Image: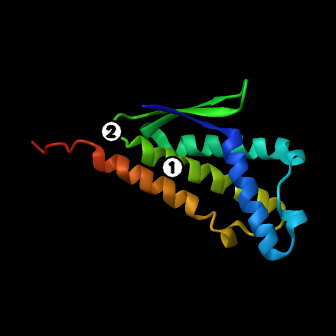
Amino acid sequence: MDMTITCKSILDEVAKQTAYLGAKRGDYERLSTTDANDEILVRYWREAVAEAAVEMGNAAQLTLIESPAESVEVALDSAIDPALAESLLRAFLIDRVTARWLALAGISPASTGAGTAILQIISFKAQNLRLERPLSPF
């Protein structure tokens, strides 16, 4: 099963999160992202995709596509639920990009909930392990 996740969709969610956090903390101008920040955010997106590829291991093959629009193509193992995989991967990418942006703004990523991204990928790996066929000891 293949799926595509675009950089724009991830960066739109990052913009929503940073705008909300900036408004809650009373520091909207410093925390929210703008179109002028796209170069930095795209770099963070690429780093997050590379990190996700390592974390997912054999469960999924991630291919970064840079043109015409920045995106990642995901080829999943047939035993993986595609809806769950897409949801977890999107959450991971959003959390990673947001955490890096907030670290740049001087806010600890641990205080934003972005630390849950690793737990999401671990649960993805756990699902993959449960779906593998057990081997007989004989």
Answer whether residue 107 is visible to the viewer in this image: no
Q: Amino acid at mark 1?
A: Ser
Whole-percent x, y for residue 84 in the image: 43, 48
The quadrant of the image that shows the C terminus is: top left
Residue type beneath disc 2: Ala
Q: Is residue 101 above or below residue 90?
A: below
The residue positioned 64% from the left and 57% from the top of the image is 95
Quarter holding residue 59: top left
Is 121 in front, or is 15? Answer: 15
57 displayed left or right of 49: left
Q: Position of residue 32 (x, y in %)?
A: 83, 60
Assess disc 1: are there few (<14), some (14-19) or many (≥20) residues with their C-alpha within 10 Å of its C-alpha: few
Rendered-image quadrant of the N terminus: top left
Whole-percent x and y of residue 118? 54, 58
Looking at the image, residue 95 lies above or below residue 134: below
Q: Which mark is residue 124?
A: none
Rendering coords of residue 58 (x, y %): 43, 37
* Front-lying residue, 135 or 96: 96
Give the residue pinned by disc 2. Answer: 79
Q: Earlier in the sequence, mark 1 or mark 2?
A: 2
Which of the two discs, 1 and 2, sits closer to the camera? 1
* Residue occupying the point 81% across, 70% down: 23
> What residue appears at the point 63 percent right and 40 percent down from the top-left corner?
50
Left or right of 126 in this view: 70: right
Spatial CA distance of label 1 from label 2 is 16 Å
Secondary structure at badge 2 equals: loop
Provide the residue designation for mark 1. Answer: 87
Is any atom of residue 8 visible in this view? yes
